[in-house]
Image (spheres, helix red, strand yellow):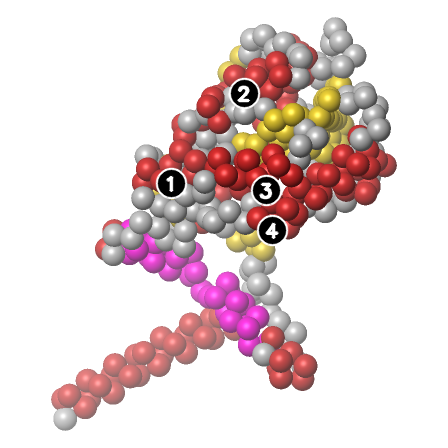
Amino acid sequence: MREKTKNIIVIVLVAALLATFSLWCWLREADTYSDSERRVLAKFPTLNTQTLLSGEFMSKFEDYSLDQFPMRDTFRQIKALTEFNLFLRLDNNDIYLADGHVSKIEYPIKPDMLDNAAARFEYLYETYMADKDMNIYLSIVPDKNYFLAEQSGHLALDYDELIEYFRGKTEYMQYIEVRDLLSADDYYYTDTHWRQEKILDIAQRLAAEMGVTLSATYTENTLEHPFYGVYSGQSALDLTPDTIKYLTNDVLDGCIVTSYDSGEPVIKHVYDLDKATGKDPYEMFMSGNDAILTLENPAATTDRELIIFRDSFGSSISPLFAEGYAKVTLVDIRYVKSDMVGDFVTFEDQDVLFLYSTMLLNNSLAFK
């Protein structure tokens, strides 16, 4: 009798727990965005005869239920701690720890993604530059897995193969190598991006290959607001935040930044200190991922201009080119269609730099 009573109590408690979580899930207002993961959460799927019979409803409902589960971040943290500390797994959902860094496995090389990126770049070249007196350059930035993955026992890309493959698709560009100037500590510990204060030598090499000398000195400033990079949320671990440092001097203080993200010119700042205390403080660099930005240097002693087709790595390095150019234009074809770039940018005789991370080239569906 005691055993039967105990079983009944267990069943009732489990049923009550499941009922509580079910009611909590159904009655609570659905979240639309995960701040920790920096992604939009799944919405309740459309329910009709077509989606029900095709299986689409149940497939999307599964994503919705996982995204909207009560105390989701708490359970994610418990899972991550269990994976790393109890089961001694090398990674949790491709997130891993190595040499004080948090990173995400990028593997394997995806030729179709590289082909897609190369096709976008070729379209831009043929449409806007092929018949102009322009110098076209390419530089590929390795993600920090280049320095961490293989040494820590994780799947690792063959970066030589990736870069050679992509160079073969973009022979109309002069390639500039930067891998030898980088190390893991040139990147934030909890984020994908490189640290601005660590990449002066990168800017100098890129500029030198384009025939420009950079020799300016800077004041290093430290942002008081902590920086929890994208891997902080994705790892679901309680990590020590990074510190963002940014470089200033008289040249940058006098520069004018204009955004055309809305289609109309809007004056912005080299460093947006309002965004420095937002969800992603890295967006303080050149206002984040605006589609088209210009950085003009009224004190320039040259009339040379530079156009950078870029991803978010270009946000923090682009101010370092201000010394050598009268105007630097940033174009992000994740947010503006390639066939619309000419509506905002006049191509004449500028230097053009395609500066992209291996991670984006290997996952290039966002290119328009």
Q: Is residue 301 above or below residue 102?
A: above
- Which residue is rendered at x = 32% and y = 40% of the image? 152
Per the image, the residue denoted by label 4 is 112
| Position in image of residue 299 (x %, y %) | 74, 9
Whole-Å distance between the Cαs marked 1 and 2?
A: 22 Å
Front: mark 4 or 2: 4
| Position in image of residue 344 (x %, y %) | 83, 34
Residue 202 numbered tag: 2
Number of numbered tags placed on the structure image: 4
Q: Is residue 131 above or below residue 358?
A: above
> How would you rate the neighbour count of disc 3 (Cα within 10 Å): few for under 14, some for 14-19, many for 20 or more?
many
Q: Which three-letter amino acid code belongs to the residue tagged 2?
A: Ile
Q: Which residues are magenta?
A: 57-84
Element marked by disc 1: loop
Front: mark 4 or 3: 4
Residue 361 numbered tag: 3
Tell which circle, 4 or 1, labels the residue nearer the N-terminal end: 4
Whole-Å distance between the Cαs marked 4 and 1?
A: 23 Å
Per the image, the residue denoted by label 1 is 149
